[in-house]
Image (cartoon, helix red, strand yellow):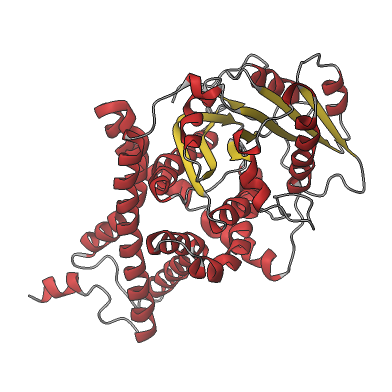
Amino acid sequence: MGRSLALTFPFEGLPVWAQVLFYVVFIQIVLVFLWTLVLFISSRRAIRSAPDPDPAAVDSLLWIFLVPALDEEVTIADSVERLLAVEARNKAIIVIDDGSTDRTGEVLAGLAVPDLHVVTRVPPDARQGKAGALNAGWRHIDDLVASGRWAGWARERIVVVVVDADGRLDPDSPEHVAPFFADERVGGLQVRVRIYNRDHPLTWCQDVEFSIYGLLYQAGRTPWGTAGMGGNGQFHRLNALDTIADPETGGPWRNRLTEDQDLGLRLIGAGWRGVSSSQTAVNQQGLPTLRRLLRQRTRWAQGNLQAMSYLGRSWRAELPFLVRLDLIAYLLQPVMQAVVGIAFVASIFLWIFDVADFWGDNGWIQLLFFFLLGYGGVLLGCIARGAERGPVGLLVSVLVVPVYAAYSWMIWPVLARAEARQLARRTDWAKTARHALPQGDRPQGS
């Protein structure tokens, strides 16, 4: 009986403060796991019920690609070339040269491409963040549809596609995306993100990470209309962007560290639905060095901290209760991750000072239980990633869990640095440099 009770109440005998902390974390982890299970079930249904590709629907829309470019001489020609290959009869490409000091402008000037429009920004307006560049592109759309070939297109039939300068959008993306916009409530759609240079252990882990996010969390939220927007591969209805345009910023994007996340949240708050498509993807460069990866993820984490200002508005928004609950849980992720991190440090402290024996009788069972509970969400995510490849994919998914779990532990130094920057009110950031790749490089197999 005593041994059974020890397993039922694993924190018995610890100091009171430790019991309180560990039980709070335990309850939090259980709730997060259950919520992830709900998203897993929802994602499977969403993927199975995704609308069929519709090439005919593509021609009913005008596709305008916005490509922000700051010192992108390495990738910009490749990016434009691949956008030209996108299968859409009605399309235009707007590249915003945001004050580049390398050969970006020269490369663009040498491209003899129909329907390529280059918006050149110069200081002091240039180099003020991605949001400013995108807003300049959004304003240029007015000139594009005022006269000429694209005159007369209704703004609700214009889809604005944000593709980073290293982005490689699947050529058939429009036929997968267009059916979603048959629903007039859809304001934004995010396609799945893949890493095309995933031949390095670190970039492979990033590909796993993006696949889990797209196939579990994004797909799971799609039926509720709360899928988030990412920096690469966003599709927006133009009149939806119009509804959240801010005169002070000159467009719908605001100067945030994660301007894409901010935009998606404001679209949902304005009553638009956010959805995702896992049937098509945008491929982008992964970061093969740990230093650059940690710097990038620190920026994202600090952006998540900034987004917590939406907590009150999300709860008061005129949205279904389930939608509001999901938004609150999503916004509170940095807090929940920090609490788990504190508990982890506390457990090491208790073990070092021999306050708690985590390896005593039945200790391994408790550790196994907490590992399965804590990383159950990772397991579900890996299963979601591998489900499309049948039994072999599911088997590989289980083998991937320990590797990806170890990779995910970088969240702790990232959170600490992001919080320090937020407290210091530092919002400056250096642009991540691109890696030169062969022009003919194609996405690799998994």
Q: Position of residue 28 (x, y in %)?
A: 36, 67
Q: Residue at x 30, y 58 (%)?
A: 34
Q: Position of residue 2 (x, y in %)?
A: 11, 76
**How many numbered markers are drawn?**
0
Q: Is residue 360 left or right of residue 170?
A: left
Q: Residue at x 31, y 81 (%)?
A: 14
Q: Name the residue nearer the viewer: 33 or 180.
A: 180
**Quadrant hosting residue 45:** top left
Asked whether residue 69 appears in the rendered view, the answer is no
Q: Residue at x 65, y 52 (%)?
A: 243
Q: Name the residue nearer the viewer: 41 or 157.
A: 157
Q: Is residue 410 left or right of residue 105?
A: left
Q: Residue furthest front?
A: 152
Q: Quadrant of the N terminus?
A: bottom left
Q: Quadrant of the C terminus?
A: top left
Q: Is residue 349 left or right of residue 105?
A: left
Q: Name the residue nearer the viewer: 18 or 108.
A: 108
**Quadrant hosting residue 292:** top right
Q: Residue at x 35, y 36 (%)?
A: 47
Q: Name the residue nearer the viewer: 325 or 8.
A: 325
Looking at the image, residue 134 lies above or below residue 281:
below
Q: Is residue 10 left or right of residue 73?
A: left
Looking at the image, residue 308 lies above or below residue 41:
below
Q: Position of residue 315 (x, y in %)?
A: 49, 69
